[in-house]
Image (cartoon, grey):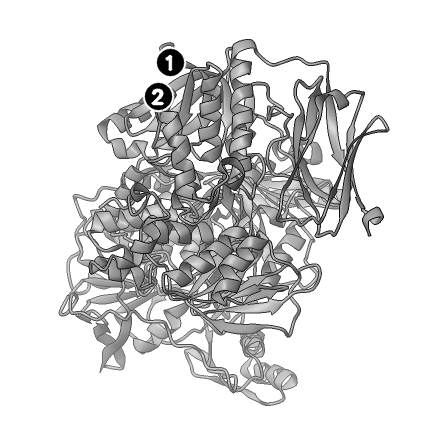
Amino acid sequence: MNKNAKTYDVTVIGGGPAGLAAAISAHEQGAHVLLIEREDRLGGVLKQCIHDGFGLLRFGEKLSGCEYATRFMHKLEETDVEVRALTFASRIEKTDEGFLLSLIQSSGFEQVKSKSLVLATGCRERTARQVAIHGTRPAGVLTAGSAQYYINILGQLPGKNCVILGSGDIGLIMARRLTLEGANVLGVYEAKAEPSGLMRNIYQCLVDFDIPLHLSKTVTEVHGRERLTGVTVSAVDERMNPIPGTEEYIPCDTLILSVGLIPENELAESLGVKISRATKGPECNQDYETTVPGIFSCGNALHVNDLVDYVSESGENAGRAAAAYAKSGHEHRLKSVEVKTDKNFGYIVPSHIDLPAKDSVPFFFRTSKTRGRTRVKAFMDGKEVFSKVFAGLRPPEMEKIEIEAAKLQGAGPLQFTMEVDEHEQ
Amino acid sequence: MNLKKKQQKLDARFSGSIRIEDSGEYFHLTGTASTWEEAVEAGLLCAEKGGLKHIVSDVTVPGQEKPAPILPKLTDKTLEGRTPDILIIGGGVTGCAIARELSKNKLDILLVDKEYDVALHASSRNDGMVHPGIDITPGLLKKKMNNWGNSIYDKLCSDLNVPFERTGQYLCFKKGWYLPFMTLSVPYCNMTVAGKAHVVTGSKLRKVEPDVSPEAKFALYFDGAGMVCPYGLTIALAENAIDNGAQISLDTAVLSMETEENDGKTTIKSVTTNRGVIYPKIVINAAGVFAEDIAQMAGDRFFSIHPRKGTNAILDKKARRHINTIYSLMGTQSKTGHTKGGGIVGTVDGNVLIGPDAIETIEKEDFATHKDSIQNSFEKHNHAGKWLTTGDIITYFTGIRAATYEEDFIIENGRFTSNIIHAAGIQSPGLTAAPAIGLAIEELACKMLSKQMTVEPNENFNPVRQAIVKPKEMSDEDREKLIAANPDYGIIVCRCEEVSKGEILDAMRRSLPCDTVDGIKRRVRPGMGRCQGGFCGPHVVNIIAEEKHIPLQQVRKGYEGSEILTGEKGAAQENGAEQENGAEQENGTPQEKGGGRHE
């Protein structure tokens, strides 16, 4: 180990919206911060998000992704946070003093020490083969994020006649983007019976541009040797299995996939961080501290968000807590209480809370399926500690609630439930 | 089985629609079958396993045409008038091993392949196992070649700097009471397989493979089994052949041959390709699934190839923690059958492979995968590894085996044509056998050539090929020095596989040219990881364009015609038409627009 290694209080891995917010908030707590970004510029995926709709919650205005990121980057410039772009964290080891990071950069190989870590590594896109699309392997099959990079960063249009699989937000945004750039978007296909993206994107990206949305249909096979020549789409049953006999061939030269995002936690896993099956991100407490003391997680690495505003919020939370950890170590609270939900929930974050809580605790959850008026309640030791009615819940739309610290007392677990709000009907 | 009996068998099965004749050198099947499976069945019905008198089948299926080979669109005259001593047709592992072994001699060697890279058919579409030869019938030529090839692997891979791991293989058994019988079979195994075999108890098995299924009560262990990256080896053989003076011409398809008759023997006079007419002294047929077509062009058709496809799934490196070697469980079949041997294989690159199945097909180049293949393989191998889950799949691929009806290799001089040598019918264990086939063909070729020229050793032959550096596997100190000398090794392009820009540029600057996204992927692995190029794809495209000084729109995924960016926008921009972007400028901050284009 390099004895001359520089030491930081907090090292943030990833310079996207979560990492930017984490670095700034850790700095504001007086921490000496290192921010590592593997690409040549900060901003993460926001760099290629030239569409608007970012920052409504935080800034009360509609910004493009680039503008949203730039606001944080300007703020970062006023700090003494050390930023390393085009730098790759190849390996992280746990040491007695904290963490030893091995960094690869064009200036050389370097090891640095850090008392705490914030993992803001974002997420990756699920690929064609990961959603069981069979057939050949021609050019012209790409994820929505790659297509967005080609168009918005490299200034290149990937194809002329496009089919989009998946009605996730990126898929919808790319449907509009491709249309604006002169490509012909033949349709968006969604295996589920309802769209996966935000309602506003369905209207602004598809309806406004007359792009058809085909629900309960999926692409089962791609054709073509050199370049994609067409796709087979099939209707699917309730369990999303293709129904034989419903196959339809659609000639096209490009298939864009927006079939889900997977939190990137390979670094976290290498450090022994426990990953939640529900979120695919680390299990964590209300400070977003993972199961390994000193390692914090935020943004889409923690769970896939639909709004960047929440990503920044989790980054700030994690950065603040990481700075506190660097100062005084893991905060030993009286007890850790598990957060449980009934089957109506897709997932909830955090997975556990450490009591006593200092401030009110925010919870982020998704419903497992679309619901009408629903009452969400939380109980602790049989006592109701929270109750709120939602006019409607949809899996693509993440909800946030807060519970006052004073109410979070008892042995636990903290149990969340959902029920139809009959009173109102 | 005499001819009459063969015909009776055919009649009993196909009610007279298929005829068999003895043409002296081979049995000729003609007629029609109602499906391709039946056409193949007819051949297999009459064939004698390992028989030297082969089945040549012209059985057709009404309404089903055998697809013609897919040919390169390119035509030029770069090879016009070339007079190599040896023309090798086929750039798979067999052809490349032959070229490499032949380059030990002072010869003008030309290898042609119709594809844009070597190892594009079966050699990049198999599970990479170096077999001990467990289930090959003794007496077959492929048994001999397998065991010989297996014994050469350590030295060859060390010379070529190709990763090779002699992991060994566990053949697991569900029934504990088989153990005494299997113990008795060990001496026989030791006589017939490459390496040694011994019985291991369940508890010993679990010390090496803790996650093997509880169904496995004991195992036969074969220490001769190993793992290699099949296309990595093929590329290395090709590069080493070129380094030693051989020429490899890609995108070069053999279209026809001109032959002449002399004293009842046929001789190949010239070979016409899309890149000119070649006048070789001798021709080596290593054309895989097209070996029969090449033999026919040469007037030397005495065998038939019936393509048989198999699909493998590749699992995330995370699944690798469940497997250290290679294992399979005897007596497990998926409900629908159609799986062939195979097993769960831990690859040299740290992934896990499952498969393959085996399905007869009329199409020699249909590499499409199908859902059933993956389901069948998982169903079967789930017995050996309960941990297997389709959720770990990162991708899958199909390969096509070049099987003869006799299910054996053909490594011999032409029977009708005097200046051709065949390395045909090379299917599994062709990868294991390849180094031996290289040596065997070298001997045959030198002997054939020595009738018309003196073959001298190539004094400059260097068996060692330097591999592309792998910074990821270096010590921290070495990596530091490497990056200091060339900062491109410090720029990580593919984060899943931790591949640097330096390695990608290296892949493009080797003796065997490579300028496609897939070609680079096979050499240094960007895009091989769990995101399958989602992040690094555009970066690799950019690096190729930069290195080759071509517009981004000309960068190909692989095949000719597989350009990645085919929309109009980029083309318009190249011409200076920027107005399309005008409207967007207001949304994006100016420095974000187009700033990523490093030109």
Query: Residue extending furthest right?
Result: A382
Q: Residue furthest left?
A: B81
Q: Position of residue A112 (x, y in %)?
A: 40, 18
For this view, does B551 lie left or right of residue A146? left
Mark 2–mark 1 CB contact (< 8 Å): yes
* Residue B522 appears anywhere in the view: no
Q: Secondary structure at mark 2?
A: strand
For marks 2 and 1, give the CA distance: 8 Å
What residue lies at 50% left-to-right and 84% top-to-bottom? B60
Q: Earlier in the sequence, mark 2 or mark 1?
A: 1
Say what amino acid the circle numbered 2 marks: Glu
- Residue nearest the observer in this picture, A29 or A88: A29
* Mark 1: amino acid: Ala
Q: Which mark is residue A110?
A: 2
Q: How many marks?
A: 2
Q: Is residue B48 visible?
A: yes
Residue B184, position in %: x, y? 67, 43
